[in-house]
Image: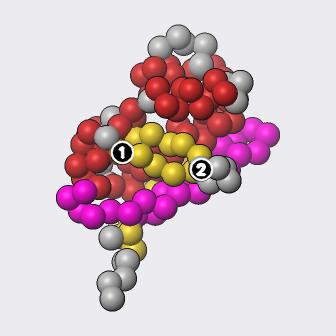
Amino acid sequence: MSSKVFIRTGTAIIEIDRIKEACRNKRFLSDYFSSDEIRFFVKHKLSPALIAENYCVKIAFAKAIGTGMRVVRARDITVLRDRLGSPFIITTGYAKMLEQREEYEFNLSVAHCKGYATASVVINK
């Protein structure tokens, strides 16, 4: 029986107002989010809180793998929700290669309140 072992963790927090401001830039969504994420945001009326949560996951993910955003592109990390609303990650590009090579399993948690959004990513192997 194999068991998963804790490897690393990353966390991020951001002011939702910063995301509202960033969304004024027409390229922000397309530069940082996958088309699946953008469809999810549109379905939820471009909620700045949800956009901020996903943004935080990307930062927390980069911290957890230890490279920051220098190596992994933000669009290589897609954050969606299952039918119960629980977030999950789909990786592409270098993030996918790393996930497969290292046999990583990602667990995440997101939250927001009136002014802030936060995310934590835990990597097990």
Q: Amino acid at mark 2?
A: Asp
Q: Position of residue 52 (x, y in %)?
A: 61, 36
Q: Position of residue 68 (x, y in %)?
A: 34, 45
Question: Along the line of sight, which residue is nearer the eye, 6 or 85?
Answer: 85
Judged by depth in the image, the label closer to the viewer, 2 or 1, is 2
Image position of 6 with respect to 2: above or below: above
Query: Going by the image, does 9 lie left or right of 48?
Result: left
Residue at point 49% right, 61% down?
A: 107
Q: Please tell me whether mark 2 sits on a helix, a strand or a loop.
A: loop
Q: Position of residue 87 (x, y in %)?
A: 57, 50
Magenta region: 100-123
Query: Going by the image, does 74 lie left or right of 119?
Result: left
Kindly indicate the quadrant of the structure image that contains residue 19: top right
Q: Please tell me whether mark 1 sits on a helix, a strand or a loop.
A: strand
Q: Main secondary structure of the magenta part?
A: strand
How packed mark 2 is, by other alpha carbons closer than 10 Å (few <14, some 14-19, many 20 or more), is: few
Check residue 55 for magenta coloring: no
Q: Amino acid at mark 1?
A: Thr
Check residue 113 for magenta coloring: yes
Quadrant the N terminus occupies: bottom left
Residue 11 in view (yes/no): no
Residue 20 in view (yes/no): yes
The residue sitting at the front extreme is 83
Residue 82's disc number: 2
The residue sitting at the bottom extreme is 1
Residue at point 69% right, 36% down?
A: 49
Q: CA distance from mark 2 to mark 1?
A: 16 Å
The residue sitting at the left extreme is 101
Sequence order check: which comes first, mark 2 or mark 1?
A: 2
How packed mark 1 is, by other alpha carbons closer than 10 Å (few <14, some 14-19, many 20 or more), is: some
Name the residue that disc number 1 marks. 91
Residue at point 54% right, 12% down?
A: 25
